[in-house]
Image (tube, rainbow, N blue to C red):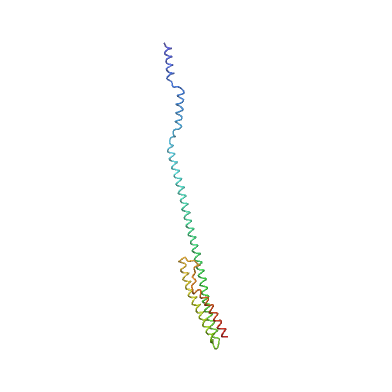
């Protein structure tokens, strides 16, 4: 009787115990679940990493914008310096062109006056003075000299006004006006000198 009861207990305990294969599968499933489960605090770390990335990107963008603004400022400064240099060069060329034209006109006017004074001095050296055709030629020569002096003075005034206006109107040095007086002055001076010389030769 006792042996029968002991055998039944052993059989029931063996029947109620879970198989080893089932226990091993459950253990493996538990291990795999634990491995795939996200670690505690991984969400906070990811958020912090995203924030740091955004800060770095913003800093780099700000640095690039600052460099671009600095380059634009330097480019604007270089353009302004270039324009100033071109303006200074243009004004210097205008001044030189005006000085050359004014010097030429002064020389023509002074030459005409000097020739007239010399011709008067030589005319006074003749005891009986100039007569006939010599006097007519001398008068024509004096008219030419006076015309040359007047034309040079008129052209001098015109060139002076052009130099003053060129500083404000951005005029080029090549646009120096070649008006009638400035063109006629040297030819009148040359004609007056030639006629005075011919008249003095005729009086000899």
- Residue 158: image location, x then y, percent: 47, 72
- Between 23 and 203, the one lying in front of the other is 203
- Between 201 and 23, the one lying in front of the other is 201
**In the image, is residue 148 above or below residue 86?**
below
Specify the quadrant of the image occupied by residue 129: bottom right
**In the image, is residue 81 above or below residue 159?**
above
- Residue 173: image location, x then y, percent: 50, 67
Q: Quadrant of the C terminus?
A: bottom right
**In the image, is residue 170 above or below residue 156?**
above
- Between 109 and 7, the one lying in front of the other is 109
**In the image, is residue 158 above or below residue 54?**
below
In this figure, what is the number of numbered marks?
0
Farthest residue to the top: give it.
1
Q: Quadrant of the N terminus?
A: top left
Q: Is residue 29 left or right of residue 127?
A: left
Farthest residue to the bottom: give it.
128
- Residue 94: image location, x then y, percent: 50, 67
- Residue 32: image location, x then y, percent: 46, 30
Farthest residue to the front: give it.
133
- Between 123 and 84, the one lying in front of the other is 123
């Amino acid at each position: 009787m006792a042996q029968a009861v002991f055998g039944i207990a052993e059989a029931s305990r063996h029947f109620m115990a879970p198989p080893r294969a089932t226990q091993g599968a459950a253990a493996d499933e538990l291990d795999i679940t634990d491995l795939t489960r996200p670690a505690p605090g991984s969400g906070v770390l990811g958020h912090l990493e995203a924030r740091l990335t955004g800060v770095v990107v913003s800093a780099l963008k700000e640095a690039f914008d600052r460099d671009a603004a600095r380059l634009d400022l330097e480019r604007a400064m270089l353009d302004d310096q270039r324009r100033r240099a071109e303006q200074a060069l243009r004004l210097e060329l205008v001044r030189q062109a005006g000085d050359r034209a004014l010097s030429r006109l002064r020389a023509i006017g002074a030459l005409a006056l000097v020739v007239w004074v010399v011709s008067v001095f030589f005319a006074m050296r003749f005891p009986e003075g100039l007569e006939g055709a010599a006097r007519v030629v001398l008068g024509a020569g004096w008219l030419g000299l006076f015309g040359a002096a007047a034309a040079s003075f008129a052209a001098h005034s015109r060139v002076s006004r052009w130099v003053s206006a060129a500083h404000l109107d951005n005029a080029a040095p090549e646009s120096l006006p070649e008006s009638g007086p400035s063109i006629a002055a040297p030819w009148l001076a040359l004609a007056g000198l030639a006629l005075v010389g011919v008249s003095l030769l005729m009086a000899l």
